[in-house]
Image: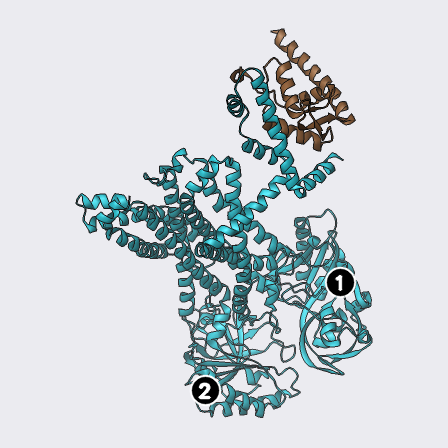
Chain colours: A cyan, B brown
Amino acid sequence: MSWLRIIASGVRARFQNRREERQLEEELRGFLELAAEEKIRQGMSRREAVRAVRLERGSLQATKEVVRDSGWESVLATGCEDLRFGLRRLRRSPGFTAVVVLTLALGVGANTAIFSLMNALMLRTLPVRAPEKLVELLHRYPGEPAFNGFSWDAYQIMRHQNHVLSDLIVDSPESFVVRGQSLEPQTILGGYLSGTFFETLGLRPAIGRLPGREGDDLGHPSAIAVVSWSYWKREFSLDPAILGKQIIVNDAPVTIIGVAEQGFEGLNEEMSQDLWLPLSMAPVIRHSALGWGSLGLVGRLKPGVSIGQARAELAVLFQSAVRAPGAGPFIRETKFEMEPAGSGLSTPFRQKLRTPVFVLMAIVSLVLLIACANLAGLLLARGASRHQEMAVRTCLGAGRGRLMRQVLTESLLLSLLGSWVGVFLAYFGGRGLLGMIASGQDMVSVPVQVDVLTRPDLHVLLFTGALALVTALFFGAVPALSLSSLPASALQPVARIGEPRSRRLFSRGLIVAQVAMSVVLLSQAALLVSHVLRLRRLNLGFRPDHLWLVTLDPARSSYDDRQWSHLMEELLAQCEALPGVRSATLSGMTPMSGAGAGSFAVVRGHPENHRQVSINYVAPNYFATYGTRLLAGRDFSWSDQPGSPVAIINQAMVRDFFGGSSPLGSYVTLDHVTLRGSETPSYEIVGVVGDAKYNDLRQASPPTIYLDAFAEGSVMSQLTLRTAIDPEAVASAVREKVASVLKTVPIVRVRTMTDQIDGSIVPERLTATLSTWFAALGALLAAVGLYGLLVFTVSRRTNEIGVRMALGASRGDVLRMVLAEALSMVGAGLVIGAPLALWAKQLAARLIPDLTANAVWVFLGTGMILTIALVAAYLPARRASRVDPMVSLRYE
Amino acid sequence: MADKASDLVQGTLDMLILKTLALEPMHGYGVAFRIEQISGGVFRVNPGSLFVACQRLQRAGLIRSGWNATENNRRAKYYTLTRQGRRKLSGETREWERQVAAIARILEAS
């Protein structure tokens, strides 16, 4: 109860401030008067008595201060005073305030932006029941991203035979074309779910009902659907009449039976799903069985079971599933993995961004450290000019703690202002970041909705708030502590001796630290940029310039194979006739697009040599268009007949399968090519081409086999044109041709090959671009810090310099003296920074595969900071050398 | 005499103030004067610590205050012990005696 009273009386005291003050003064005065009267009674004169009392009992003002400050509410009151005072001071020096706020805003903004990305990708949990218990099942083929795609049979085995999961549910994302009454055809992302999906995640319907176990019965497909709340709002304006409505998903009519809970949009924030169908609809809509790769699996751990136990048990079940008939040779070589899924499923998108986000987080924290060191130096120099003010206040009875509190309040004010601006910077700067991320390879045919990645939430705001506090303490503590060594002599008009040695050393130490961190940042940036440049300069095995890529969507064109072939032949001929177009071709995939196909190949007569090869289906003229050299044999021709299949292989495949001998005329069979029925066809090798990159710039060209697309009757959706002029210039003409020849086939996407390649190295470009910006920022801050310190010391030493010059020092001597001081700091920074940079380089090399970690980049970083520092130091040095001895001596 | 006065043992000022007020309501100077007088000048109570303590005791509800006239017709703030304060004082006194006795035993033991 008593704390209640303490608070109440504190609050009362706060509001009855003036009365309380008067009473306190009266009480104290009375005390001193009574004490004086006592002395007078003992025989002192009144004058003596008053003096004696003051000596013995202390001054009225000081005592009043002590008593007033004893209650907790006084902290609040003085805090408000400090705040007002601080604001007034900041307003009085807008230049200083702007510099500090901007520096902080850049430092905090960079951290906030990267952290919000990290938060969205790794920390934010899904809005479902007990998300920390969710695990994702994955398998990984050596050298590729882990993949959550299992077969129906494997699902049955793993679901029913495990003892570690309370349930195993299916979530298979897929994009659908949805149309219906009053609904224009529209491509949306959705997925297939198993019956216990919503139940296991603890989700309820907003309206209607959610599909149950009946949806798992593959024999009786249930044509029902559930939509997301945001889809309901977007397309139906929250009209309850949505229930019972029929829509057409791809070609299958289904009935909407419910709307999912508001806020739930699937297990991946950046790919929000709008439509869910029961699993039994998957074979109907996909026209294929639920084979390997078709089901995404998510499990919920039983209470008390660790993810390690679950992983071990399911790995065993996975092994028995892949040994079952029907599992291809690829699957047998994959390894089972299990990851926590509480913050979303690990798409390749997330897997690729993981390392860059960590690298960037390290970089931005260094930037913030530099900013802090910079501001500490700035405030320290400014603090020196406030010594008189502080000394006066000390003499008037301000305690040291009280002064420190005021200085810290000012720092806090600055850092809050800076962080506030920083949050805005982060938000807008984040958009640029997202633009770059979004240009990456597509994961599904619906683009990733990256904007959710920078949606500010409580985590991010807390992070930024904490950052602001820590920063304020970091750079505010230095000037605050410097007050504690305030000498009594500070009251003297001009401190002639300059600053104490310890403080001078500290300011220089701050510069040294900034230089050292800048060296690390600059050399890292140089390293990452060189990495991207190297990737871009790589020999791809084809000429990437002047290639225009057009992706068609023939899935619902209603043309049969024969019509399609004819139309395509005609389209290619018409495209080649366009002005500016050199040649045109078709293929199943284009290099670096993110898609690909593979199989196991055996050369007839050598059954023991059973190896993996990559496949592409190409039309005649593919190699000429791409600029890949035909080394032996011939290209495909329009006259190749489906009856006698032919293939062209690359050098890597020749090396793997034929050693030195010529492959021409040999026959090769491929597993898993089931386009033309169940029999495995034999292909005659008719040509050999040079190696070309397939899907990943970073990897060597894989052994690749090219099959004749037309002879295979394969559906090829990629049209590629080689142009003589800027590829964009032919875009509209090509679009018209496609529309006139293929009336029912929409164009999904167009872009240049250069853009596609850039899209495939987004993580590298992201880290390189951002680290360059941040390194430049860090170096700039360090240079400004150095410049500021030198200007400050030169102005303090004007006198000394004047004396030196009067005694015969030349301008050159003075210039050299100041530069030497700067160089000593920069040199110390380099000595500390270079080993750090080398160590950071090793670290980066471990994080980023095939990074050519060359020490040259560290030297480059060192050279850059040296140049920048010399420029920053030259200006104050020149100013020092222009000091007029007469003027400076009179300056006293 | 002034420079020989020692500081109070930590935490005892509150108890001494309560004890002084237990006799009769008194103003600040009276409390200080009495403590100094009875202790024979061993303790010196400065207004700073005295009024901080008074404020603290008042907020804890152990004492009350009100303005009143002094013997020589001055206005002064008088402090009065509350019932709660009285309880607290007897408790603290017992505890203090217990501790002093214990310390004395230890010191005599050697």
In the displayed structure, A874 sits above or below A5; it is: below
Label 1 environment density (alpha carbons within 10 Å; few <14, some 14–19, many ≥20): many
Q: Judge from the rendering whether residue A300 lies leftward or rightward of residue A614; answer left or right.
A: right
Q: Position of residue A91 (x, y in %)?
A: 49, 54
Find the residue positioned furthest to the left.
A808
Check disc 2 and report the residue beneath it.
A583
Residue type at tag 1: Phe
Check disc 1 and report the residue beneath it.
A197
Q: Is residue B70 visible?
A: yes
Q: Which chain does the numbered disc 2 sit on?
A: A
Residue type at tag 2: Ser
Q: Does dot 1 land on a helix, a strand or a loop?
A: helix
Q: Which chain does the numbered disc 1 sit on?
A: A
Q: Position of residue A417 (x, y in %)?
A: 53, 55
Number of dots carrying numbers: 2
Label 2 environment density (alpha carbons within 10 Å; few <14, some 14–19, many ≥20): many
Q: Earlier in the sequence, mark 1 or mark 2?
A: 1
The image's mark for residue A548 is none
- Residue drawn 62% across the image and 15% down it: B37
In this view of the protein, which residue sits in the foreground, A506 or A608?
A506
Q: Quadrant of residue B35?
A: top right
